[in-house]
Amino acid sequence: MKVNFKDLDSGEIEEWFTNQGLDAYRGRQVRQWLYKKLAFSFDEMSNLPKSIRSLLTDKACINNLEKIKAEVSEDGTEKYLFKLIDGHLIESVLIPEKDHFTICISSQAGCTMGCRFCLTAKQGFNRNLTSAEIIDQVIVVKRSMDTPDRLTNIVLMGMGEPLDNYSAVLMAMKNLISNDGMNFSHRKVTLSTCGIAPLIKKLGEDIQVNLAVSLNAADDKTRNFLMPINRRYPIKTLISACRDFALPNRSMITFEYILIKGINDRDRDAYNIIRILSGLKAKINLIPLNPHHSLKMTPPSMEEILHFRQILIDNHFTAIIRKSKGEDILAACGQLSGRHNKME
Ligand code: SAH
């Protein structure tokens, strides 16, 4: 198997080069080409001697993502469909904001978590992505942008559960934020999890990025129904892991809460949120459920959503309503299926 340098950190690349009998600084040069110049071939790496370039072409690979399709939504959101080397499909979404772009990337082909409202869950699980496949989503999209410098924010909120693919996700984030990597600000990288509690704590120890937790229900009965992971790590365990994560120098934890009519949108649900999050530096993103026909659930009316939000605000929580973008091209939260055609 050819090595992919995006699966290695800077120390490991240097080690690879010295093992080949080459100088370690050649590894640093390659990293520059990969992450700063977004190179797609070793031939481009003009400050390497030809002999090294041909050795690298033999022993290493660069990009294994094949762009199958890009769709643009009416609101400017772009959805990219990628084919992995073994044929599995994944999606990434480029979201225009006021003065920058955010990219939403996938961490797995499919997902094992089985959340009841999520379209990715319906396709089951294929495999974990490698660190290189996670990073290449950013690189391929960035290469296709007119204003690549405006891509400043990354959210791991696409297909898959990032903490279920911990080591590859950690390596990818390290390379995305390190100075000699893609150099994204760690304050602008957000990992979103369904709540694998022990790994939330570990993440807090291993790297400094923002955390988003898909809460979606504030009592165990409702959360067990919506999100099977809750049976393993119930709300009390989850919130306690969040408290451990929330070190003093960190910013707030974002709690995502999909609003689903008749299931988690009652007044008492809002009061439960207030109770379980009390004392945490938390901000709440209310997301009206993005419907699709395979779900038997619908979002509440805007009036009901505003009422729910008001309860949180009256109790001194920051709560915003986040209508996700790109619904018309099935690029919104929970709609990524990795299918070529829209689901029938
Ligand atoms: N596994 C991770 C990241 C992927 S899901 C996680 O659970 O956080 C990304 C976000 O999309 C989560 O907040 C999830 O709750 C939300 N989501 C899933 N299905 C949705 C739907 N049908 N409508 C709105 N949001 C949805």
Image: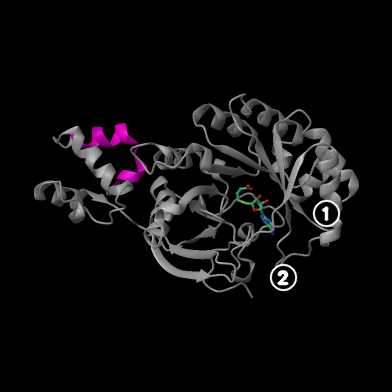
The earlier-in-sequence mark between 1 and 2 is: 2
Q: Is residue 186 left or right of residue 329?
A: left
Q: Residue 245 shows which numbered tag?
A: none
Task: Report x, y in % for residue 229.
Answer: 69, 43
Tag 2 secondary structure = loop
Magenta residue span? 4-18
Tag 1 secondary structure = helix
Rounded to the nearest angstrom, the CA distance separating label 1 from label 2 is 25 Å
Image position of 249 with respect to 79: above or below: above
Snapshot quadrant of residue 178: top left
Image position of 33 with respect to 12: above or below: below
Mark 2 vs ligand 1: CB under 8 Å?
no
Q: What amino acid is found at the position of numbered circle 1 in the picture?
A: Leu
State which quarter of the image contains the C terminus: bottom right
Q: Is residue 124 visible?
A: yes
Magenta stretch contains residue 160: no
Q: What amino acid is found at the position of numbered circle 2 in the picture?
A: His
Mark 1 vs ligand 1: CB under 8 Å?
no
Magenta stretch contains residue 10: yes
Task: Report x, y in % for residue 258.
Answer: 74, 52
In the foreground, 263 or 25:
25
Q: Residue at x 33, y 56 (%)?
A: 63
In the foreground, 323 or 97:
97
Task: Report x, y in % for residue 181.
Answer: 35, 41
Q: Residue 293 shows which numbered tag?
A: 2
Q: Residue at label 1? A: 306
How is this picture coloured? one colour
Q: Local crowd at mark 1 within 10 Å, few (<14), some, or many (≥20)?
A: some
